[in-house]
Amino acid sequence: MGIERSEDAGVYKLTEKLAIIQTVDFFTPIVDDPYDFGQIAATNSLSDVYAKGGKPVTAMNIVCFPIKKMDINILREILRGGLDKMREASVLLIGGHSVDDNELKYGLSVTGVIHPKKVVMNNSAKPGDKLILTKKLGTGIISTGIKASEVNKNTIKKVTQSMTTLNKAASEVMMSVGVHACTDVTGFGFLGHAAEMLTDTNNGMVIESSVVPFFKEAKALVEGGFLPGGLYRNRDFRKGMVEFSEDVPQYLRDILFDPQTSGGLLMAVAKTKASRLVDSLLEAGVRDAVIVGEIVEKPKGKIIVRQIGLPLQGKTY
């Protein structure tokens, strides 16, 4: 599995029982605290391995740092944050590379392992499957608000906690219950990554926007015009695939296209397993896990977004 597909990571089979998963990601700071930024960047980089159902085992740092303009202690804090998150994930840091750059950037190249027959693809969902999302949306919008000093400390704390939460538990539960497909929700936004789940399939998708979890603070920021540039690009790229019902408010449409950093997993699971998967995720501490839609046969290649609640949300609801 390589660049010929819109998958979250590359997978290379070494033996009949072992494959490696490889991924890389880095970006500029989205929060002011360097330690938190390091944790977020590392969590985000590890996420693609979890989306494939694998276990990350090693990582290498990628650093761009303006050594002549910025205090070296900032870099130390970033690397400390990343290392602490790697330790939490039981990942070994084995090296890395740094360059002097005018713009600060940090991330990881990550290698994971998995049995070749257990790899979870992003476009192997089946009609009737329920779609489950594990984290709230709105991190891109709120990060834009942070840069404009429009976000209070409590909101920054909540969003940072979400972005530094590993998808490890969600992935482990997903693999124990069994799903048909999975992707992680990052830069292409919820609808962008959902669209990738329909690539090269005969499927369509229905999203129940009224139950999609998002940070409530994002609504006011959207209405105040604090939209990241990536949101516009995501919307322009996928607008031909998405149809909104008239009752879906504009702010929610924007949130569904919002580019996420270190977002949750979006899983497609058989209807008979959906309730059990949600309950198992909640019991494992994945607090925002919820059924947000389903895979349908028609309309092929389209995502229908409507403002209607789902009847099946698991016993916890």
Image: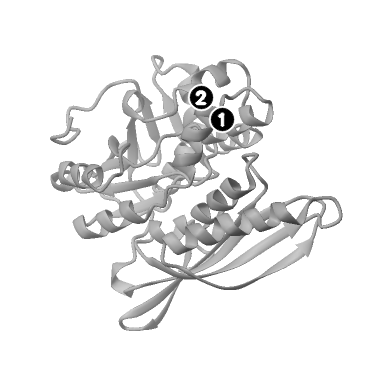
For disc 2, the marked residue is 218
- Report the residue at 53% width, 44% height from top: 261
Q: Quadrant of residue 56?
A: bottom left
Q: Which part of the image, by quadrant, shows the N terminus?
A: bottom left
Vertical comparison of 48 with 116: above or below: above
Q: Return the x and y of residue 91 as percentages of the image width and height.
A: 45, 68
Mark 2 Cα within 10 Å, few/some/many (few <14, many 20+)? Answer: many
Q: Quadrant location of the C terminus? A: top left
Q: Position of residue 223 (x, y in %)?
A: 56, 15
> From the viewer's perspective, is 41 left or right of 304?
right
Q: Residues within 10 Å of mark 1 (few under 14, many from 20)?
A: many
Residue 7 in sight in this render: no
Q: Position of residue 314 (x, y in %)?
A: 16, 36
Q: How is the image coloured?
A: one colour
The amino acid type, in three-letter code, at marker 2 is Ala
Badge 1 is on which residue? 142
Residue farthest toward the front in the current orientation of the protein: 73
Residue type of the residue flagged with mark 1: Ile
Answer above or below: position of 97 versus 251: below
Question: Is disc 2 in contact with disc 1, using a CB cutoff of under 8 Å?
Answer: yes
Residue pictured at 15% horizontal, 45% vertical: 276
